[in-house]
Amino acid sequence: MILVAGSANLDFVVRAPHIPAPGETVLGRDFKTFPGGKGANQAVASAKAGGAVTHMLLGLGQDAFAASLEASLQSAGVDMHIVRTPDHPSGTAFICVSDDAENAITVAPGANAELRPEHLPSLAGFTHLLLQLETPLDTVNAYAQAARAQGVQVVLNAAPARALPAELLAAVDVLVVNEGELALVSGHQGSIAAALASLTVPTVVVTLGHQGSCARHAGGFELQSAFPITPVDTTGAGDTFCGSLVAALSQGQSLKSALQFASAASALACTRWGAQSSIPDTAEVNAFVATAPATDTAAQAALRAFCGLN
């Protein structure tokens, strides 16, 4: 059983030819709103794609945005522990998605910034606590310390990127980062493999976009090439990876198998619009893995070289 403690935002998404440069105005096209937020996205991925029993601790305002955020989590089967903040609005995010499926995101935290250490529910029965950095850092640290003290596995997605205190990293069992976040957290300017090795967290996973992912665990490395797809919108792909990964690990899958499952789920999410709306269900992920082409040895070799493992 997984507890996700983190953010929930309503995403305001506009499609445009390219992401505006500073001072530039770009004429967009399609506009939609979607439930999002790193914590909520990961909770939906854990429950929907991963098929894990998932709870979420989140902060919401007393506004119309909160209703759609709750509805999305409920429809995915996530059990909610809501901290209601009438003096603060629910979180929002403003997202521009370019024609090449890249995105730029600005977040207004709102009620997410009001989560406090005392809001953590009982951890009895939970095997994993999944955290991100869209809620206050001291709160994230307090939750991690509480979970570590009670023998609950702590998984931290260190996003958005920021330097982390040693105390927090010492309480983490699995750290998930992208390439930029890895550089910031590790402070290492060398290869990806060297940066992974420089961290003392038992398991570190780095996602590498269209290259795939790489993990350092038990003195060795696991590589997972990306599944070939034509992306439509990459919003929420990293969150889908995180939630699916933790779900697979909580069900006893090996790290290698969990990486493959998470990569497949995030690949499928990139072929659809939105964050939570793009997350596939377990059957879709399993079918995608079963029908995917065999591992491309050239792609695997390229990934090894990219990570500095040759």
Image (cartoon, rainbow, N blue to C red):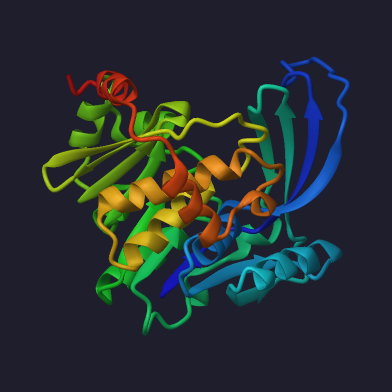
* In this view, 289 is above or below 308: below
Residue 114: percent from left, percent from top: 62, 64
Q: Quadrant of the N terminus?
A: bottom left
Quarter occupied by residue 9:
bottom right
Write the residue at 41% across / 30% down: 208
Quarter occupied by residue 232:
top right
Residue 137: percent from left, percent from top: 46, 54
Q: Say left or right for 152 vs 109.
A: left
Write the residue at 30% across / 66% down: 153
Q: Say left or right for 43 vs 173.
A: right
* In this view, 137 is above or below 194: below
Q: In which quarter of the image is the C terminus?
A: top left
Write the residue at 47% across / 27% down: 210
Pick the front one: 193 or 305: 305
Pick the front one: 133 or 98: 98
**Is there any visible trace of residue 145 in the rendered image?**
no
Q: Say left or right for 61 vs 233.
A: right
**Which residue is situated farthest in the left direction here?**
219
* In this view, 304 is above or below 215: above
Pick the front one: 284 or 74: 284
Write the residue at 32% across / 42% down: 205
Residue 135: percent from left, percent from top: 55, 56
Residue 37: percent from left, percent from top: 63, 53
**Is there any visible trace of residue 32 in the rendered image?**
yes
Pick the front one: 66 or 266: 266
